[in-house]
Amino acid sequence: MNEPVVARHWLALAAPKATPAVATSTVLILGRIWNANGAEHSVGNAALMVVLATGAAAAGALATVGRAGDSLIAGTAFATSGALVLAGVAGYSDGLSLPLLLWALATVVAYTLAARTWRTDRREAAAHERHLGERRQEHAHVERVEALRAGAQIEVARESAAYATALAQAITARAALPGFDTAELTRAGLPELPAIEITKES
């Protein structure tokens, strides 16, 4: 069966591409809002963000250690650490130049990491589609072979039935001839024909 083709909306296609920029911009905006509400030059707030960012980075480092390391947890922890650093700088700084510089750097890093993920996803999707195509071709080939085999069997059965009918009619016609002797045919080397009783209606 053919699978229906679903056309995705352009927003659905563009949303994953815009996610890194939206995420870093959101962190920058929240940091500036925090700056406007008293975080500027606040040593306590800066120390809190340093502790949180360091903790998140340490958690990411621990998640990559050993055989049981989880790349998803490590990536999430490092992304959280970077977001906390950006938010802390945006909240603590009195100007926009340093927060904007960090925002641009964070956006570039986010797109670099996302590009690797997108490339892996595309590769896996292409491999999956190729595997499905091979399976479809294999099934289609099997179906064609089975259809040809069934058609050949039907044709052979039809020919066998026609041959059997013709043979039965020939035997009946020969047996009805006067002077027909099956023993003479057997002596001549022909296969013995089965005896057929002919009943005449009165």
Image (cartoon, rainbow, N blue to C red):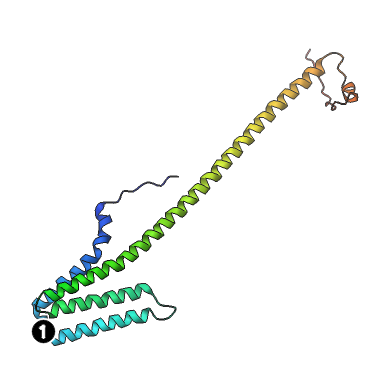
Q: Is residue 154 left or right of residue 88?
A: right
The quarter of the picture where residue 141 lies is top right
Q: Nearer the viewer, residue 113 or 189?
A: 113
Q: Is residue 152 above or below residue 88?
A: above
Q: Position of residue 58 (x, y in %)?
A: 31, 83
Q: Report helix, strand or loop for mark 1.
A: loop
In the picture, measured across the screen, residue 167 lies left or right of residue 94, that is right
Task: Please identify the quarter of the rendering in which residue 173 is found.
Answer: top right
Which amino acid, mark 1? His
Near-viewer residue (64 or 147): 64
User: Residue 96 falls in which quadrant of the image?
Assistant: bottom left
- Residue occupied by mark 1: 41
The residue lying at 65 percent from left, 30 percent from top is 158
Taking 152 as reference, is 199 left or right?
A: right
Q: x and y percent of residue 159 in the render?
A: 67, 29
Q: In the image, what residue occupies the spot 34% across and 81% down?
A: 61
Relative placement, left or right, of 75 versus 141 is left
Task: Judge by depth and name the residue closer to the eye, 191 or 32.
Answer: 32
**Quarter of the image where the N terminus is located:** top left
Mark 1 surroundings: few (<14), some (14-19) or many (≥20) residues within 10 A: few
Quadrant of the frame with the C terminus: top right
How many numbered discs? 1
- Residue 11, position in %: x, y? 24, 55
Seen at 14% across and 78% down, the residue is 91
